[in-house]
Amino acid sequence: MTSPATSSAPDLQQYAKGAASTAFGLVLDDGSELQSLEVVRRVPGKRLVCRGLLNGQAIYAKFFIGKQAAKYAARDKRGSIWLAQAGIATPALLLESRVADQGCEVLLYAAVSARNAEQVWQDIDAGERLALARRLVAEIARHHRAGLLQTDLYLKNFLADAQAIHTLDGDGIRRLRAFGRQRQQWDNLACLISKFDVDAVPAWLPNLLQQYAVAIGDKQPGIGRMQRLVARHWQNDMRQYARKVQRSCTDVHVEQTSQHYLAVNRAKDSPVLRQALAAPDGLLDAAGALRLKSGNTCTVAAIEIDQRKMVIKRYNIKNFWHGLGRAWRPSRALVSWANAFRLQVKGIATPTAVAVLERRWLGLRREAYLLTEFVHACDAAEFYADASIDQEAREQVARRIARLFFQLFCLQLEHGDFKATNVLIHDQHPLLIDLDSMRQHRCRKRSERRHVRDLQRFFKNWQADAETSWLLTKAFRAVYTDGRVLDQAGIVVK
């Protein structure tokens, strides 16, 4: 349904904050009428991106809000002009305007009939992903050949169709500096490669580097150097996102007072959820709640909020001294919350984190609560103990578990408690749970030692099951490109 443009402009700040989401119309200062505007992206207090219509033509409207709106609009426009001048495919800039009474700058871009590269990536298999990765690498080489650098390298900033890759987000386009130009190019290439499937990168790297060298007409970087650069970007991506979701951002809303700290996943937020979180202890004992664990350190229950099944985990304070020790440190609930998003940003499956709540007294932390989506699944031990599951499914799940471990190894992540019960098998795919002991290591050697310990702890679950142990060993040996850590962990095919 088309929303007519009105002379009374809606409050764009409310749309940017997520407080409003309905389609709307708008009249710009130059008289242009925008219709059927729907929010596709928001950066609270700074930017709002909508798709809609201008005189019947499909467009994307970028609204720049706040004190630095003019600066960011000018930068976005400049980047788009540079791309167009270099002959790089990018949506055409149609109009520049304002909504003066809201201090808002507006850029209108033509809609391109191509899909977001991130969406395309999710819908294709491994072989097709390598082909798309080669096309994206070649596109970045064209940027570099034109003296340009895309500093906001995410797959969602590219559109892909059969003919071309279209570059979005002129705001992230910069000129390559004359000094250290090759180093900038290689680091930028590593940033792009770090967005591909973590476990595929080691095998793809020689192919991608060759593609880059052909496209740019220059020598390719060494594989070892590129591996180090990619690993550094993996580390930075996870750390930045883990910090980001502990404050208000596009994905998370945060409320903080001297009595509590609350972070809620915007995609899962609702008034009913907020009301339930006002009395979290009541959720654990509510009628219909299924108690999963009643331990000294934590209490876990499966519950239902707003007709959605969830799991709530309360991290208890055992005594005065335990409370004193926990008062100054981030709670285990908050650590789990950050780690869930750390895994999410790298495509590692874990139940979606819905909310985290820390009770505080004069700013000192007390009990903490973590709310996640409920996943109806058995754990890895139950899966392999089920004699009704056929051999093909067992082998497929073993390969996927091995892939999960290899991803953690590449990312230098230590789980810290790899019991079989902490790996759920949902629709023959493993999901990692119980993330409060997970750590991200800076030191590669320390990470390898910890990964060996994770491997040994996991395989300990099948000491009495030689068949499953052999099945998993074979899968791990097939997935790991370097078998050193497997040798150190004693995982050998006998």
Image: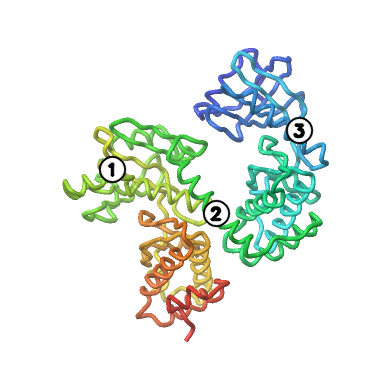
- Amino acid under disc 1: Trp
Dot 3 corresponds to which residue?
Answer: 110
- For the point 48% across and 60% down, the residue is 412
Q: Residues within 10 Å of mark 1 (few under 14, many from 20)?
A: few
Earlier residue among tags 1 and 3: 3
Most extreme residue toward the left is 320
Task: Tell me, for residue 328, which label it has, or none.
Answer: 1
Dot 2 corresponds to which residue?
Answer: 234
Asked which secondary structure carries label 3, the reply is strand
Label 1, label 3: how far apart the Cα atoms are: 51 Å
Q: Residues within 10 Å of mark 3 (few under 14, many from 20)?
A: some
Earlier residue among tags 2 and 3: 3
- Amino acid under disc 3: Ala
Residue 483 image position (x, y, % from top left)? 53, 75
Earlier residue among tags 1 and 2: 2
Most extreme residue toward the bottom is 494
- Quarter of the view holding residue 379: bottom left
- For the point 61% across and 24% down, the residue is 69
Q: In this picture, is 212 found above or below 478?
A: above
- Amino acid under disc 2: Trp
Q: In the picture provided, is 165 more to the left or to the right than 317?
A: right
Q: In the picture provided, is 156 more to the left or to the right than 297?
A: right
Label 1, label 2: how far apart the Cα atoms are: 29 Å
Residue 415 image position (x, y, % from top left)? 40, 60
Q: Are marks 2 and 3 in contact (CB under 8 Å)?
A: no
